[in-house]
Amino acid sequence: MFCKTDEICICMMCGMTEHNGHEKVEQKMEREGKQDEFTCSICLDTLTDPVTILCGHNFCLKCLTNCWDQSQEFSCPQCRHTFTTRPELHVNTLLNEVIKKFKRPRLSRHSSQSFAGTGDVECDFCTGKKFRAVNSCLTCLASYCQTHLQPHYEIAVWKGHKLVDPDRNLKEKLCEKHQKSLEIFCKTDETCICMMCGVTEHNSHEKVELELEREGKQKQLAVTRSEIRRRLEEKEKKLRETRRTVEEMKISLKQKMEEHDKSFTVLIRCIKEAHKKLTEKIRKQDKRNVEKAKEVMEQLEKEIEELKRIEAELKELSDTKDHLHFLQTFSSCCVLPADGDSLSFTVKADFSSEDLLKELSGLKKSLEKISQWDILTWTPPGKLILFLPILAPQWWRLARFIPHPEVFQVLDHLVLIAPPGAEDSSSQALELWQRPLAATPSPNQAVDDSMSLGATWESGK
């Protein structure tokens, strides 16, 4: 509201205390009344460089000067009071300052101010549709728009108030016990307190102003942020390294897959070629056996015919009554032809089916073992290690083909590791992993013939 007695803007509390008996009106009504008092009757606008003539009326210096320059007499444009001589015009300094103060809130209100929108802090003193607050006062515990904030800049008593950015939670800045502004920080209890708390329950505690405590906390905050940035850089570096490792793994995996596909393609082609050759060999062998059997059958048929013929002659000789004829032909008829070796024919094969099945069974088991290889998750960085199930006796057989089996040796990408008891087993390079059927391999454990010895596949080889 506006106190007409003291010509200043006041709050509701001031109106009920030190300005209790004064004449007061709402700022809007006062502004509308003063608008007529500060209007030039010539240009009908707010006075600019106001001058006051002897009759008491006020005009703009420029408006009155132009009016008298165009007139034969010098009279008041409002009351028509005539002056014998042209009065000397001077700007009314006091009135000019009052008009400037009157103009300032009007211009700010209509040019720079805006109504409060969603999320804006509203002015606590606007009536009707409220303007957006530009500041909040921690002393008044209220928020002000540009118009209602002017007394804080113009009135000496209010110039000492603490203004902050608009804050809708001003009640949270009050002490719950004393309803006073929280202006002090108690370092003993690490809490914000009001002046009344500082002289009562926190009287003997170490206290500082909020600004000083903020400076100390700000330094701690800077240290914490620095540590966070350091950790972020470290984590981001690890993330980049991990991504690079993943990309390298993808490339390595692609290469290995291509190599494996190529190896298996060659293996499959070899198997197909072996199958084809074996099939052709079996067919050729079968053809030879069939041809041999045909020859034997033809020979047997001839021998059968000859024997039947001789049998018929002998039967006829046996049935004859002529003793002379019987004796004369007996010697020639009883002589049998020589018996050949055709009956000794047997089917022979150039290979053993039993051996073939045995070899194929061994190949099948080897392929099945490949599909059972385990990838260890605790491998050293940069190495892909596969665990191959190799029994102790088998290891010794494999070791015969390696010049120095007591240390790591590569044989077709297979790295063998010596079992316990091997020569130089104390070497730092020697490690032994056992692989129980239901357990993960662990280093440096005893092993027997029922356990599997460790073998590794190194991707870098």
Image: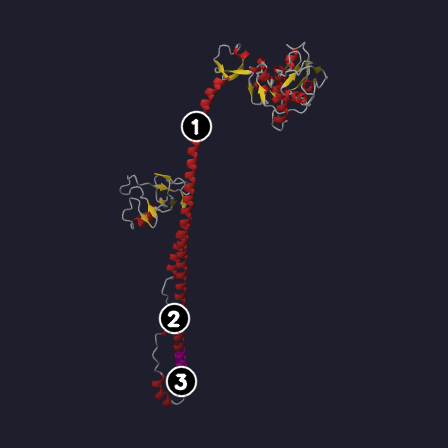
Which amino acid lies under the numbered mark 3 shown in the image of this protein? Glu
- Residue 309, given in percent of the width and then of the height, sits at 40, 83
Query: Circle 2 is placed at which residue position?
Result: 288
Q: Residues within 10 Å of mark 3 (few under 14, many from 20)?
A: some
- Mark 3 near mark 2, Cβ–Cβ under 8 Å? no
Q: Secondary structure at mark 3?
A: helix
Name the dominant secondary structure of the magenta segment. helix
- Residue 369, given in percent of the width and then of the height, sits at 40, 50
Which amino acid lies under the numbered mark 2 shown in the image of this protein? Arg
Splitting the image into 4 quarters, where does residue 66 fall? top right
* Scheme by which the image is coloured: secondary structure
Query: Circle 3 is placed at which residue position?
Result: 313
Q: Residues within 10 Å of mark 2 (few under 14, many from 20)?
A: some
The mark found on residue 93 in the picture is none
Q: Is residue 461 above or below residue 360?
A: above
Q: Is residue 299 above or below residue 207?
A: below
How many numbered marks are there? 3
Q: CA distance from mark 3 to mark 2?
A: 38 Å
**First in sequence: mark 1 vs mark 2:** 1
Q: Is residue 442 above or below residue 206?
A: below
Q: CA distance from mark 3 to mark 1?
A: 127 Å
Query: Circle 1 is placed at which residue position?
Result: 226
* Identity of the residue drawn at 37% across and 88% down: 326
- Mark 3 near mark 1, Cβ–Cβ under 8 Å? no
Tell me the magenta residue range: 301-309
Which amino acid lies under the numbered mark 1 shown in the image of this protein? Ser
Mark nearest the camera among 1 and 2 is 1
